[in-house]
Amino acid sequence: MVKAFKFRLRPNRSQRRMLAACLSDHCDLYNAALEERRTAWSASRVPVRYTQQSAQLKAIRHDDSGGQGRWSFSSQQATLRRLNRAFEAFFRRIRGGQEPGYPRFRSRHRFDSVTWPKDGDGCKWIDGDSASDGISRVRLQGVGTVRVHRHRSIEGIVKTITVKREGPKWFLVLACETDAPGEQPKTGRATGIDMGVTHFATTADGEHIANIAPLKTNEGRLARAQRDLARYPKNRKREDRSTRHWQAARKVAKLHRKIAAQRRDYAHKTANALIERFDVIAVEKLNITGMTKAPAPRPDPERPGVWLPNGANAKAGLNKRILDAAWGQFIDILTVKAAWAGREVIAVDPRNTSRTCTECGHCDPDNRDREDFHCTACGYNDHADRVGAVNIASRAGLVLDGDGRPSTSEAPQL
């Protein structure tokens, strides 16, 4: 199995310049290869393959020894494979009847990563445990030996090395091949999870997991930073923009990175806590794209050109809260962590889970009033999110006791 480890790079000033130049040249290579494919197809309907473009690298490096020739041959091949995957995804979407999205040219300021496919080929990982001074480093062709802040030990054998830029910071991503992870001790427990915006999640035993809402928490500071950015002019030419414009832009970008980091960190911690307690976890198979779709306009049939209220403002606020919760990211993280720990995550159909009575099975939209659940058939009362979690667990075939709590004696064994 492959596991990734992400560490902070500590390049000096000259190494920062070389890393930026490395990204810039790989971006140029990506765009040139894309232009070759586009031109060949539009002019003569001739497809250009990866093997053909990879064979041209030797001549390109020879003719531009001070530019493309500075970098690792294998990393340039990885960039060409990156473009090839973009085209493969494009044709896959066409075959599947989806919106294709033709590969686009990349700006130098948005091309933020370069990959070396093999440790020892144009790059070398130097673990601090084997170094005399205990400092981890990575040696990159054309850049030099860069210090790495290795905050934890890596597992397995390093296979690929990726350098990534996030704003003003640089990171190193090591993809390591490890043995199959050891399973955690069985707990004999199972549960269902109902996702929400008031509470981030609710388990089948009624436990509510708080929603930290990182965007809402930082909304005031973000609004002030965006007002500062709007105050300074954005000229047409990038080099003519004022220093204060760039300072304000960096502040906005920094806040967005902080919000994303808080959201991701909370998802990891919540997933770890659930995996430690349960062997089997049932979750909703959510169509978040459909859930956050803007409502369709409502034309007035009696007055042409006049539109009726469609609740767009209220729906926009709900969509913002849903996206801030990042349910999809959490479920992806939970699924991966569960596989590593020997747990199981089961996705079920979420329709009417919070409208169906857990006692009599009666399904009625009137059963739910905001967060309260009151069955119109049998009179059962409970919290709507807990009812949803119990129904999600039931749809996954999990065994719960009479109070809706996970059964320790009859929970499915993996």
Image (spheres, rainbow, N blue to C red):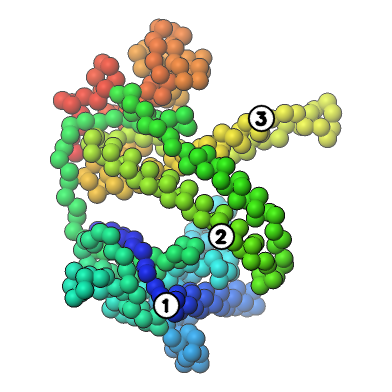
Q: Residue at x 51, y 37 (%)?
A: 322
Question: Is residue 268 positioned above or below 362 on the image?
Answer: below
Q: Earlier in the sequence, mark 3 or mark 1?
A: 1
* 76 vs 229, nearest the viewer: 229
Return the residue at label 2: 250
Tally of marks: 3
Answer with the quarter of the image where residue 204 lies.
Answer: top left
- Which part of the image, by quadrant, shows the C terminus? top left
- At label 2, which amino acid type do we have? Arg
The numbered mark at residue 311 is: 3
The Cα atoms of the two marked residues, 2 and 1, are separated by 21 Å
Query: At 64% across and 74% down in the image, what residue appears?
Result: 42
Residue linked to disc 1: 15
Left/right of residue 277 with respect to residue 365 in the rendered view:
left
x, y percent for residue 154: 23, 62
Q: Is residue 141 above or below residue 333?
A: below
Within 10 Å of disc 1 (Cα), the crowding (few <14, some 14-19, many 20+) is: some
Residue 68 or residue 147, whichever sits in front? 147
Give SS at disc 3.
Answer: loop
Expressed as whole percent of the image width and height from the top left, the position of residue 386 reads 37, 23
Circle 2 sits in a helix, a strand or a loop, which is it?
A: helix
Can residue 364 be seen in the rendering of this structure? no
Residue beneath the point at 48% across and 77% down: 17
Q: Earlier in the sequence, mark 2 or mark 1?
A: 1
Mark 1: which amino acid? Gln
Q: Which quarter of the figure has residue 189?
A: top left
Q: Is disc 2 in contact with disc 1, using a CB cutoff of under 8 Å?
A: no
Which x, y percent locates residue 216? 52, 39
